[in-house]
Image: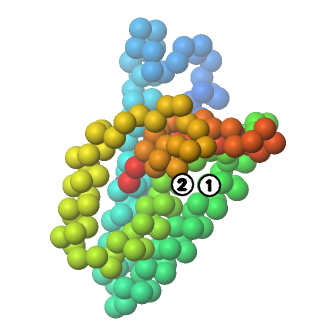
Amino acid sequence: MVRGLAMVIMALDHIREFWTPTAVRAEDVAHASVLLFFTRWITHFCAPTFVLLAGISVFLYQQKQTSKGVVSRFLLTRGLWLLVLEIVVISFLLQWGAFNIILLQVIWSIGWGMVALAGLIWLPRGVVAGLALLVIAGHNALPNIQPVTAATLLPALVYDSPLLYQLTPRLPVLAACIILP
């Protein structure tokens, strides 16, 4: 039910600009109505909800399985499929081939989270809890990586959001708006 509610709210945000004739941005509190602002504000809970539910689903799936190897393989393959889906399908559908850009967003983040969990499930829970606290507490201690260059692309993909990077003049622009799980 929570996933369905998040999908309805997300759909509200994604179609709002196609169905409303307003010329103001929903985030512009000086010009937007309270209802218009609320329709944009509430959608900020969608991506974190999807990431949270992905983690809960992994936990529940692991409770049913007797082998960590089965769970690890499942997480690795599911995560890699989500990465491919984000790059090949979602990027294309969001722009309908009109732009030369690769978008890396929530599905990309969930995919890498599953790939990471494929290895993390082998660690003791105390170590995983410590790593989780380190990520949460230290997230804002990392420097903002600007400008994004070839040398800083990997750390920027892991931490910075959003970012744009031109791989080569012939390849698409890499655009990331990643939410860390």
Residue 3's tag is none
Identify residue for label 1. 86
- Residue, x 47% and y 74% (percent of image)? 75
Mark 1 vs 2: CB contact within 8 A: yes
Task: Report the front residue among 15 and 77.
Answer: 77
Above/below status of 126 relative to 32:
below
* Rendering coords of residue 56 (x, y %): 33, 65
Asked whether the viewer can see residue 8, the reply is no
On-image quarter of the C terminus:
bottom left
Above/below status of 25 relative to 102:
above
Left/right placement of residue 45 relative to residue 145 reads: left
Which residue is farthest left? Answer: 126
Task: Report the front residue among 140 and 28.
Answer: 140
Task: Report the front residue among 9 and 102.
Answer: 102
The kind of residue on which mark 1 rests is Glu
Identify residue for label 2. 108
Left/right placement of residue 152 relative to residue 89 reads: left
* Rendering coords of residue 24 (x, y %): 54, 14
Q: Please state the total of marks drawn on the protein image.
A: 2
- Residue, x 69% and y 43% (percent of image)? 167
Mark found first going from the N terminus, 1 or 2: 1
Left/right placement of residue 26 relative to residue 16 reads: left
Task: Report the front residue among 115 and 8.
Answer: 115
